Image (cartoon, helix red, strand yellow):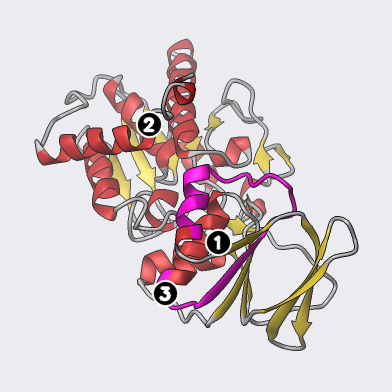
C-alpha cells in the first residue's frame, strides 16, 4: 500500500481540490435533463442520500420533489459538520446543482408536521426516505436530568445554524469518533479552554487526521475509560471516569458534557407504519416494508459516512426506477 512507500494518498484533499476546481470554473458536472416520465417521486430530507437519489431520478426523466424540514437544504452537510471541515458554499453549490436538474426543493416543510407520509404515498408514485438520524444518544446514568449535559445533536446543529453557543471554559466530550472530534474542536473554537475527550475503547475510532487536528488544538484524549458519573445536582460541574482496569479513576471539571456516542431516529412515530429494527428502517434492496417507500443513508444503515450515504442514495434511485418501470 502507498503508506509503505511514503505516505497514504490524501483522498479527502483530492476530493476538495476537485470540488474547488468545479466551483471556480463553473463546470456543469451533471447534464441538464428533460422530464420524460409522468411519475412523481418524493424525497424526505435533503441530506447527501436524498440529493444523490433525487439527482439520479431527475437524470432518468422523473419529476422529483424534496421535502426539507429546515430553512436550508443539505441535511447533515449543512447542520452536522463544522463549517471549518465543510464550507457552506460547497453544500449550497451541490444543492443548486441538483435543483438545476429540475428537482423542486420545499424548505420549512417537515414530513409528519406539514405533510404526512400518507399524503406522500397517495400523491407520489414512490417515496424515498433519506431523513437521516437527528436524535442524539445519551446514556442514562441514573442521576436524573442535568443542565449542561447534551448530545452531539443538541450541540453541533445549533452551533452551525446560529453561529454561536455559550461554551464554558471546561468541556468533556464522551465518545471519540469523528463526531466527538467535531464536538471537541467546535467547543475549542467557541471559547472552551480545557476540552477532554473520553473514549471507552483502547483504539480511537476517529480518522487519524481528525485526532491529530484536535490534539493540535490542545484537546486531551483519554482512552479505555468505560464508566462515568456526573458531579453536580441540577447542573453538571464535573465528571468522574473510571478506567477499564477498575483501578484508575479521574475527576474532570466540566460545565458542559457532550455525549458523542451516535445518533438515532428523531421521531420514531413518523415510521409507525414501516418496519423498524432498533435504530434504522428495515430495507431489502433499499425497499421498506411498504413497497412504495424506499430508504437509504443513515436512516437505513444506522449511521455511516457521507460517501456511503451518496452511494446508497444512487443505488436506491436505481431500485426506485426498477419499481416504477415494473409498475407501468
Residue furthest to the front = 5
Q: Nearer the viewer, residue 121 or 102?
A: 102
Residue 273 appears anywhere in the view: no
Asked if residue 99 is positioned above or below residue 258 in the image, the reply reads: above
Mark 1 is surrounded, within 10 Å at the Cα level, by few (under 14), some (14 to 19) or many (20 or more) other residues, namely many
Count of labels in the image: 3
Residue 85 x, y percent position in the rendering: 37, 52
* In the foreground, 244 or 276: 244
Residue corresponding to mark 1 = 153
Residue under the image location 33 percent in, 57 percent down:
72
Callout 2: SS: helix
User: Where is mark 3, residue-wise?
Assistant: 190
Q: Which residues are magenta?
A: 189-215
Query: SS class of the residue under badge 1?
Result: helix
First of labels 1, 2 by sequence position: 2
Q: In the image, 169: left or right of 2?
A: right
The CA span between labels 1 and 2 is: 27 Å
Q: Quick check: is 79 in the magenta stretch?
A: no
Q: Which residue is mark 2?
A: 11
Amino acid at each position: 500500500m502507498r503508506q509503505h512507500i511514503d505516505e497514504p494518498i490524501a483522498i479527502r484533499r483530492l476530493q476538495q481540490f476537485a470540488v474547488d476546481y468545479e466551483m471556480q470554473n463553473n463546470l456543469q458536472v451533471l447534464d441538464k435533463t428533460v422530464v420524460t416520465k409522468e411519475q412523481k417521486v418524493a424525497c424526505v430530507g435533503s441530506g447527501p442520500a436524498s440529493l444523490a437519489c433525487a439527482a439520479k431520478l431527475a437524470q432518468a426523466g422523473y419529476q422529483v420533489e424534496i421535502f426539507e424540514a429546515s430553512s436550508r437544504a443539505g441535511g447533515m452537510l449543512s447542520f452536522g459538520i463544522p463549517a471549518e471541515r465543510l464550507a457552506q458554499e460547497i453544500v449550497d453549490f451541490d444543492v443548486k446543482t441538483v435543483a438545476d436538474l429540475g428537482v423542486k426543493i420545499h424548505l420549512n416543510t417537515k414530513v409528519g408536521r406539514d405533510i404526512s407520509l400518507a399524503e406522500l404515498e397517495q400523491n407520489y408514485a414512490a417515496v424515498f426516505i433519506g431523513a437521516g438520524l437527528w436524535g442524539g444518544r445519551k446514556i442514562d446514568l441514573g442521576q436524573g436530568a442535568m443542565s449542561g449535559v447534551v448530545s452531539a445533536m443538541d450541540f453541533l446543529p445549533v452551533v452551525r445554524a446560529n453561529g454561536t453557543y455559550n461554551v464554558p471554559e471546561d468541556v468533556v466530550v464522551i465518545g471519540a469518533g469523528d463526531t466527538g472530534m467535531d464536538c471537541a474542536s467546535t467547543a475549542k473554537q467557541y471559547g472552551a479552554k480545557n476540552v477532554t475527550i473520553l473514549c471507552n475503547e483502547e483504539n480511537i475510532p476517529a480518522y487519524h487526521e481528525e485526532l491529530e487536528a484536535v490534539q493540535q488544538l490542545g484537546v486531551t484524549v483519554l482512552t479505555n475509560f468505560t464508566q462515568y458519573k456526573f458531579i453536580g445536582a441540577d447542573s453538571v460541574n464535573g465528571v468522574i471516569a473510571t478506567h477499564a482496569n477498575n483501578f484508575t479513576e479521574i475527576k474532570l471539571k466540566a460545565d458542559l458534557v457532550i455525549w458523542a456516542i451516535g445518533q438515532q431516529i428523531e421521531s420514531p412515530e413518523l415510521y409507525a407504519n414501516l418496519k423498524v429494527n432498533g435504530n434504522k428502517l428495515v430495507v431489502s434492496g433499499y425497499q421498506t416494508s411498504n413497497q412504495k417507500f424506499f430508504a437509504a443513508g443513515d436512516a437505513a444503515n444506522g449511521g455511516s459516512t457521507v460517501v456511503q450515504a451518496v452511494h446508497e442514495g444512487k443505488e436506491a434511485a436505481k431500485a426506485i426506477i426498477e419499481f416504477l418501470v415494473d409498475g407501468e
